Amino acid sequence: MHRIALITGASRGIGAAIARRAASAGYGLALNYARDAAAAESLAAELRAGGSRVVTLQADVADEGQVLHMFERIDAELGPLSALVNNAGIVVPGARLVDMDLARWQRLFEVNVFGALLCSREAARRMSTARGGRGGAIVNISSRAAQLGSPGLYVDYAASKGALDSLTVGLGRELIEEGIRVNGVRPGIIETEIHQTSGFDDAKLQAAAAQIPIRRLGRAEEVAEAVLWLMSDAASYTVGATLDVAGGR
Ligand code: NAP
């Protein structure tokens, strides 16, 4: 059976690694990105050269109109969706709560939480066996921050990922009777460009790596392996679970 996956935030980092791994597993791919069209097109060209069906879709996952248009394009250009990875996410510069403002929290929750809610709703409308769909899988990319809380750094980001973990539990139980398995992954500190936003420079990252039981940062490919397993039928009895991929952190 031909499988179609939407990966949000696929232009780089963990999303791009998931896209490469999904392409090698035979998925047709919808690659979503926000701003970096060149990076998304370059990845799409690489995957097409390997024989994959790929469309690139610019959309801010926090914008309902853009999300609706993105799913309509998937329907028209790729066919029935079978998997969604809610990977698009942002961090914010390190700060203490007393120095944070509402605008920062609004954008963080719009992207990290409302984005996942919007995309999950549209995917469920299409994949639900109760609505004529064929079932499927949703994987939410959370963070170890959800459980560690990130005090003094970004408790707001951690709280947004905690919300995502609750969504994974609730939606997992709500949608399983409609043939949709919802699960999540909590990455630890993974080497991607996201740290440029949080103000974590190389020295801070290496210092953090020394505190991780495995004594190194993670690679995006290592997160992708867990995501692909959760998407696959090999995880057929795994529902509402979130897997730590964090080197023991
Ligand atoms: P990244 O390198 O910064 O990449 C983020 C991706 O998300 C980019 O493709 C970006 O697209 C896209 N994006 C950002 N805002 C978006 C929006 N509003 N709508 C659609 N796409 C949007 O980040 P990453 O490190 O790969 O992180 C991916 C996910 O893993 C995030 O949810 C993050 O919170 C989570 N995570 C990361 C780490 C880590 O250490 N790296 C740890 C735990 C959890 P454009 O470039 O086109 O804007």
Image (cartoon, helix red, strand yellow):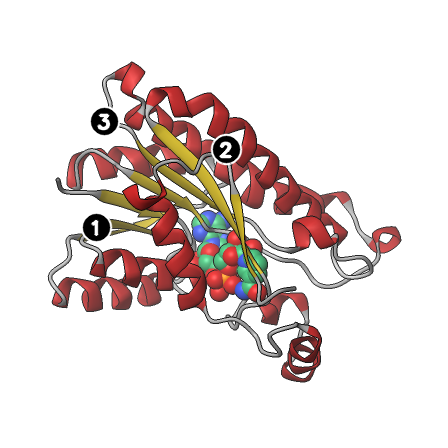
State the SS at label 1: loop
Front label number (1 vs 2): 1
Residue flagged by tag 2: what amino acid is it?
Leu
Specify whether residue 166 is in view.
yes
Numbered circle sitting on residue 117: 2
Q: Secondary structure at mark 2?
A: helix
Position of 31 relative to 237 (above/below): below
The x, y position of residue 42, in whole percent, is 26, 68
For this rendering, which residue is in front, 136 or 199? 136
Residue 15 visible in the picture: no
Comparing 133 with 183, the one in front is 183
The residue labelled by disc 3 is 134
| Secondary element type, mark 3 | loop
As drawn, which residue projects farthest toward the right?
98
- Residue at point 69% right, 49% down? 147
The quarter of the rendered structure image containing the C terminus is bottom right
Would the CB of label 3 be found within 8 Å of ligand 1?
Answer: no
Cα–Cα span, label 1 and label 2:
23 Å
Say whether residue 104 is left or right of residue 127: right
Please give the label number shown on residue 27.
1
In the depicted structure, whether residue 94 falls above or below residue 3: below
For the residues carrying marks 2 and 3, which lies nearer the camera in this image?
3
Identity of the amino acid at label 3?
Arg
**Count of all numbered marks drawn on residues in the image:** 3
C-alpha separation, residue under disc 1 versus residue under disc 3: 15 Å
Q: Earlier in the sequence, mark 1 or mark 3?
A: 1
Q: Is residue 158 above or below residue 221?
A: above
